[in-house]
């Protein structure tokens, strides 16, 4: 099954639509007809100037951060599923996100200079946390050369709980940051301004860059390590690169948007059901779809109880957890025999 | 073409291969036979560079396998694995195209020559008509041919096959092995194939290598190796060897169950006919 060019244009259009929705809808709604004028700098009246300020200082950086986060989580979710050859792998379920959160909170609790340089340091700490977790889960869950779904989820839950407990401990010790850290952890891109966008962009671009060029390699890996080896792949090295790239993208996303569950599970699955399992298309379509879906979920989170803003992680989990259970039920026989 | 020299492999404490030496020449089919646990799979895995030998060497056209890069090795030697655990949603064409991996870059961009090679391989394996089907929709015999076509797309001089006829019916067993023979003869491939069925080995292999407990017990033509004196101690069963009525190749006939549990009617051909004729309905 090969997705046609229309598929890419459709997903692009979806992304554009949810982006426009995201920057126009909120506590103050910006009419669409004003948007063009405001963005091209034809401020005109005072109202347009207010809109311009809202857009440039709040909406646009927030939308870009959410876009990057959605792209990173869905892209790395697709990559983890391919790497583990397991349809239930997701940055959240295998504990990578909790590990990244632990790393980020550790960096924040130690020293959190409110500058761009300080911001750049957070994803690095988050990356160390996520890399440690993913290797721990991989080693704990491995039975011979396979990663069975049962052991993977158990190891993910255990390692993830361990990391979350450490995170809570760190947060309780620095009470001043507690409230901010808590809403951050529930996912919502609550940090404002352009700094988080610029700080996460290079890491996510690098991580997703590696993943997006690895479709062929992930296809080969679907036949198992032994066949990948006989087809000329340096399996251990390739897997290490892919795990590091996916963990880097996840870490940078979690570092500024918190733990947003199930996006990395749902999006690649929907793409797989609609357009097949070829990773050369699955990866880019997941990246685009993840960005679009998270932007839509985030807009919903901002309007559903307005003026109160819900953490977007609540929305994705409310949708994602039932989807996960449905998937588990569907795959029960094949996975758990 | 493929030279295995005094190969010793151990899993933790247990020796799985003990100083095995054998060579497969270009254009030859060598069947690897032996009881379960004799070391057939281990030998194939070591010969493909998947596991490292304790001592000894695996030479591909004179070059030690461990000195070759992963893609260089995959241009010399292809493996046809058993068919379980294949991703069901891959198309046949896509799967065979993956055989070009050692010639492609990281992105896997296939050029015209790669697609031509895939078409040729599908043709040789006799599955051109299946090219747009999904692997999950195919029978075991068809899947085995897809894996053979993928190995052919690798364009290697050496081919290893791991019990390729295991789950196939009689027609597919002989069909598949005839195809392998044809490829060995016409393309000059060196083929090392692990087989359980001794009679298939006798029909389709130029030589057989008999493994037992990690040791090479015998190496030669089926006529040289297939005798009760050599096979009975290795397999632990009584057997007779006869000549195939048509080809003269050895046929191995194992002893049946003891008389007290033998299926009813056994022995009619050599003993007098039963007094009461067989009746289906009493």
Image (cartoon, coloured by chain):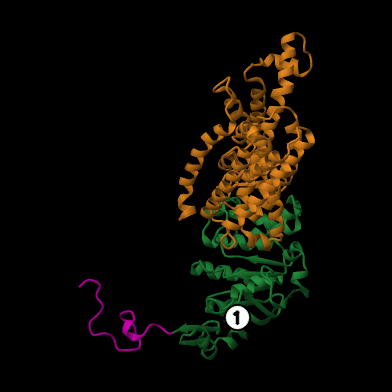
Chain colours: A orange, B green
The relative height of residue A219 versus residue B185 in the rendered view (above or below) is above
As for residue B280 lying within the magenta part, the answer is yes
Q: Residue at x 64, y 27 (%)?
A: A18
Our reading of the magenta stretch's main secondary structure is loop
Residue neighbourhood size for the residue with mark 1, other residues' Cα within 10 Å, grouped as few (<14), some (14–19), many (≥20)? many
Q: Image point 77% across, 67% down: which residue?
A: B68
| Residue A62 falls inside the magenta stretch | no
Q: Position of residue A154 (x, y in %)?
A: 52, 52
Residue A210: percent from left, percent from top: 73, 46
Where residue B203 sits, quadrant-wise, is: bottom right
Residue B163 x/y as whole percent: 57, 70
Pointer 1 residue: B214
Instruction: Specify whether B186 is left or right of B266.
Output: right
Q: Position of residue A209 (x, y in %)?
A: 74, 43
User: Which of B258/A209 is in front?
Assistant: A209
Chain on which label 1 sits: B
Instruction: Tell me which segment is drawn in magenta.
Output: B255-282
Q: Residue furthest top?
A: A45
Residue at position x 74%, y 9% from top?
A46
């Amino acid at each position: 099954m090969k997705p046609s060019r229309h598929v890419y244009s459709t997903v692009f259009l979806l992304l554009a639509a949810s982006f426009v929705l995201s920057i126009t809808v909120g506590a103050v709604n910006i009419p669409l007809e004003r948007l063009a004028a405001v963005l091209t700098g034809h401020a005109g009246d005072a109202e347009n100037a207010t809109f311009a300020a809202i857009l440039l200082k709040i909406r646009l950086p927030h939308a870009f951060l959410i876009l990057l986060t959605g792209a990173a989580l869905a892209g790395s979710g697709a990559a983890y599923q391919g790497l583990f050859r397991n349809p239930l792998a997701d940055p959240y379920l295998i504990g990578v996100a909790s590990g990244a959160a632990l790393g980020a909170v550790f960096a924040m609790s130690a020293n959190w200079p409110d500058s761009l340089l300080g911001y750049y340091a957070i994803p690095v700490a988050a990356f160390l946390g996520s890399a440690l977790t993913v290797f721990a889960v991989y080693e704990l869950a491995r039975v011979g050369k396979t990663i069975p779904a049962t052991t993977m989820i158990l190891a993910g839950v255990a390692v993830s709980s361990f990391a979350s407990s450490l995170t809570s401990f760190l947060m309780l010790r620095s009470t001043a940051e507690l409230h901010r850290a808590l809403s951050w952890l529930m996912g919502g891109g609550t940090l404002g301004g352009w700094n988080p966008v610029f700080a996460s962009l290079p890491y996510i671009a690098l991580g997703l860059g590696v993943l997006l060029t690895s479709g062929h390699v992930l296809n080969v890996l679907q036949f198992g390590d032994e066949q990948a080896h006989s087809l000329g792949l340096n399996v251990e090295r390739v897997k290490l690169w892919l795990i590091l790239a996916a963990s880097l993208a996840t870490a940078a996303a979690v570092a500024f948007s918190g733990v947003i569950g199930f996006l990395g599970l749902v999006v690649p699955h929907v793409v797989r059901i609609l357009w097949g399992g070829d990773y050369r298309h699955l990866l880019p379509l997941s990246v685009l779809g993840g960005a679009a879906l998270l932007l839509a979920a985030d807009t919903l989170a901002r309007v559903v109880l307005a003026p109160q803003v819900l953490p977007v992680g609540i929305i994705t989990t409310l949708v994602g957890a039932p989807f996960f259970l449905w998937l588990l039920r569907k795959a029960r026989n094949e996975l758990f025999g | 073409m493929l030279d295995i020299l005094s190969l010793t492999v151990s899993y933790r404490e247990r020796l799985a291969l003990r100083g095995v030496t054998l060579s497969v020449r270009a254009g030859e089919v060598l069947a690897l036979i032996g009881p379960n646990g004799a070391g057939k799979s281990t030998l194939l895995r070591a010969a493909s560079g998947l596991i490292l030998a304790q001592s000894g060497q695996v030479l591909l056209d004179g070059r030690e396998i461990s000195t070759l890069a992963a893609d260089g090795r995959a241009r010399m030697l292809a493996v046809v694995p058993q068919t379980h655990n294949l991703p069901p949603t891959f198309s046949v064409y896509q799967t065979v195209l993956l055989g070009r991996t050692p010639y492609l870059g990281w992105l896997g961009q296939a050029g015209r020559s790669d697609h031509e090679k895939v078409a040729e391989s599908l043709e040789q394996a006799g599955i051109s008509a299946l090219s747009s089907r999904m692997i999950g929709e195919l029978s075991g015999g068809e899947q085995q041919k897809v894996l053979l076509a993928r190995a052919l797309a690798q364009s290697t001089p050496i081919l290893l096959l791991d019990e390729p006829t295991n789950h196939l019916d009689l027609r597919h067993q002989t069909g598949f092995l005839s195809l392998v023979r044809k490829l060995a003869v016409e393309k000059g491939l060196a083929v090392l194939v692990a087989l359980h069925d001794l009679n298939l080995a006798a029909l389709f292999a130029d030589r057989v290598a008999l493994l037992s407990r990690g040791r090479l017990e015998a190496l030669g033509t089926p006529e040289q190796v297939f005798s009760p004196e050599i096979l009975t101690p290795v397999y632990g069963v009584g057997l007779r060897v006869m000549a195939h009525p048509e080809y003269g190749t050895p046929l191995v006939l194992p002893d049946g169950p003891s008389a007290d549990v033998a299926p009813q009617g056994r022995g009619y051909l050599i003993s007098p006919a039963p007094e009461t004729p067989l009746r289906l309905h009493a």
